[in-house]
Every structure is written in C-alpha cells, then in structure tokens.
Amino acid sequence: EPEVTQTPSHQVTQMGQEVILRCVPISNHLYFYWYRQILGQKVEFLVSFYNNEISEKSEIFDDQFSVERPDGSNFTLKIRSTKLEDSAMYFCASSELIAESTDTQYFGPGTRLTVL
Amino acid sequence: ELKVEQNPLFLSMQEGKNYTIYCNYSTTSDRLYWYRQDPGKSLESLFVLLSNGAVKQEGRLMASLDTKARLSTLHITAAVHDLSATYFCAVDTGGSRLTFGEGTQLTVNP
C-alpha cells in the first residue's frame, strides 16, 4: 500500500541553524501538508500546498518557515534559524483532493526535530 | 477560532468493557476524521464522517457524527488491549487544514 515517507526520522540541530525536513507524498496525491506535534500536545496545522503554491497557512507558519516541491516527488519544509520551541515531531501528509472530496489526509511517520 | 475538544483526555478501561469518547467542535463542519496514534508513531486514519447522521464501524470501533450538535462520538465495544493508543478527532471546515482535538489516551487493561 502506498505511504508517505519522511526523512530523516530524527534531526538534532543547534539553535540558530537551518534544517530541511523531507517528505515524499503518495505518488498520485495533489495536496501536501505539514503539521507539527510538540511532545504530549495535539497536532497543529502548519501549511498546505497545491499546484506549487501555498494554499493555506497557520499563524505558526511565519517567515521562519518555507515549503518547496523541488522536483516531482519531494516536498520539503525548511526552518530557518531554529529556536528551542521548534522542537517537535513534524508530520507530512498528503491527499488526493480536498474541499469537495472525501479524501483523507494520509500522514507520514514524522521527523522528530530536537533543537539544542 | 475553531475549538475542538475531546473528552475524556485519559481513559483507562478493562478488557471487555464498552466506552465512548466524545469530540465537540465549535463551528459548522460536515467533515470529521478520527485518527489513531500509537506511542512515537504516526497518525493512522480510522474514519471519515461526511454528513449529519453518518455512522461508520470497523471492528470494535464505531464513529458517528451529529453536525447539528457539533458532536462526534467514537464508541469502543468489548475493548481489547490492542486498542490501547491515543485517539484524535480532527475537524475540516472546508479549507485544507485539519484542526485536531487534544487526543484521548486510551489504556485497555487485561
């Protein structure tokens, strides 16, 4: 069964450094998402992406964050100048369609980001 | 701002018992999802509920949606240990984001 994959599974970085989290969505999916989950807390939406542009973003997704689909398969989240509070599990998700569709968002296994 | 509230947040139950997890949300939505998360793992889709009165069942889990009451329930029948996990409801208000509840951590004891 197709699944969303993410790399790395765990990233440790120093405060102030830039990180890039990578995702390979399910191949026929058109919509891509990033969510984060701070340890022990609920899952929070960051951004959605369709047709090579951001569809929607949350208040969390400020200028520190950016997303890109650099090729036909990868979807990346870049976090510039990381802060301690960026430590979280970051989940990528994808879906075939949104809005009028019934399609579910399928989540990847996550990247645990630890900022020291 | 959309609020999604689950209760209880923690649930410890004996094998073989029944229980219900509740998910209330604060704005109009016709689409609600239930996900399961095992410790340190990703979110597994359980149910998609698309309209008022929708009911879906899979094994010992049954989910329902009442859009007028802005309430979804996840009912567990004759719980078994394998159901121990955290269960999240998530509401879709027509955009592309899902707004998640806080999660219900379920522990099923032998």
Image (cartoon, helix red, strand yellow):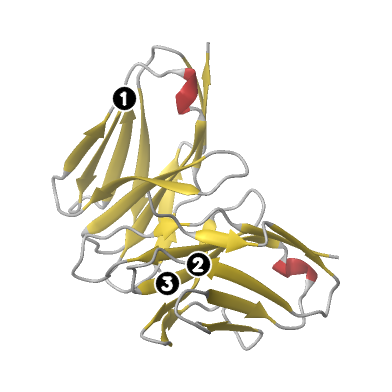
* Label 3 Cα crowd, 10 Å radius (few <14 / some 14-19 / many 20+): many
Q: Which comes sooner in the sequence, label 2 or label 3?
A: 2
- The residue lying at 53 percent from left, 59 percent from top is A5
Which of the two discs, 1 and 3, sits closer to the camera? 3
Left or right of A19 in this view: B35: left
**SS class, disc 3:** strand
Protein chain holding label 3? A
> Please, what is the three-letter code of the amino acid marked with disc 2?
Val
Q: x, y percentage for residue A40? A: 64, 48
- The residue lying at 15 percent from left, 54 percent from top is B51
Residue under label 2, please give it: A24
**In the depicted view, which residue is nearer to us: B3 or B64?**
B64
The circle drawn on residue B44 is none
Protein chain holding label 2? A
Q: Where A73 sits versus B108, above or below?
A: below
Left or right of B34 in this view: A75: right
Where residue A32 sits, quadrant-wise, is bottom left
Q: x, y percentage for residue A37? A: 59, 58
Where residue A17 sits, quadrant-wise, is bottom right
The circle drawn on residue A32 is 3
